[in-house]
Image (spheres, helix red, strand yellow):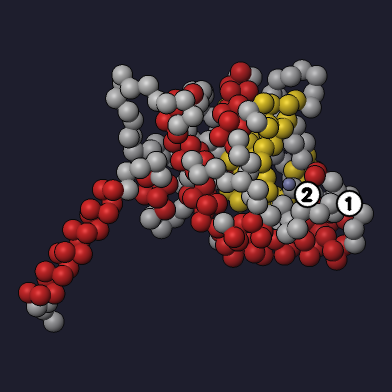
Amino acid sequence: MSATPTRRIIAATTLLALLALSACAAGPAFHARQVAAQPSPSASPSASPSPSASPSPTARPTPGSLDWYVSQAPTFPEAPPPQPVPLPVTGPIPFWHRLPTDQKVAFITIDDGGLARPPAVADFIWRAHIPVTMFLNSPAAEEHDEYFRQIQVAGGVVENHTIRHNSLAGRSYDYQKQEICGAADKLETLFGKRATLFRPPFGEYDSTTLAAARDCGAKAVLHWSETVHEGKVRYQTPEKVVQPGDVLLMHFRPALMDDLLAALKAIHRAGLTPALLEDYIR
Ligand SMILES: [Zn+2]
């Protein structure tokens, strides 16, 4: 069946409108949106350099702007090919403050999701190639799924942080399993991937937590070795330097852009490169 001239005109008009729309999309959210249109959103941040919309060499980005954050991000040595850490075949799954690896890498994790979601985070992660793991509470993930999906498209991975963010230590197996599996089920529906890592709220857990997390699909339970808040890294060890395998914890809070930048600088100072937890825990 051939198209009538009228149909052809409508089709051409629609195409022009679409082209005009895509030309207008070259704002800050351009890269993430562009990738979002691709069928597989699981691109690793190191896989494809972002198509450059770099400012002219003489232009200095305004402090606090996305361009400024990108310009402040350190340049890292290339991450080593990941050597996954050994996992126990039987028995409880491991609980780690720091990954048992000598490779010169550290890991950035961002928790919760309900409190604040600075809008430029996905673009910062995409443009600066920051590998991040997000431990989300499932109601926040559901309410703001588009926001977290943009970070997923930029290379972030969604993992499990329960439904209600209550302390699990001392609670029954049934309660813990409901909190962990319930969140895992919801996150899988939202983001198309079963969580393989679990972080208990407040880092509080017991042996029941490890059993319930395993039964819900987790391969490891993660604590942290540094926290980052309002642009400051707080070390849990006297050396005050990020160690290989360290896990840095921050939250979806108003200063998340500063926290990401502070984490990158601390990892860089230590001679390490940020890497993705899921490349090391398989
Ligand atoms: Zn939390």
- Are circles 2 and 1 on residues that touch, CB within 8 Å? yes
Among all residues in the image, which is located at the extreme left? 5
Name the residue located 38 percent from the left edge and 55 percent from the top edge. 37
Name the residue located 26 percent from the left edge and 48 percent from the top edge. 23
Name the residue located 49 percent from the left edge and 50 percent from the top edge. 150
Mark 1 vs ligand 1: CB below 8 Å:
no
Residue beneath disc 1 = 169
* 21 horizontally vs 233: left or right: left
Q: Quadrant of residue 19?
A: bottom left
* 243 horizontally vs 78: left or right: right
* Residue type beneath disc 1: Ala
Residue in front for this viewpoint, 56 or 235: 56
* Residue type beneath disc 2: Pro
| Image coordinates for residue 141, horizontal then vertical, percent | 61, 57
Which quadrant of the figure contains the N terminus? bottom left
Is residue 164 at least partly visible in the picture? yes
Is residue 272 at least partly visible in the picture? no
> Which of marks 1 and 2 precedes in the sequence?
1
Among all residues in the image, which is located at the extreme right? 170
> What mark, if any, has residue 200 been given in the picture?
2
Q: Is disc 1 placed on a helix, strand or loop?
A: loop
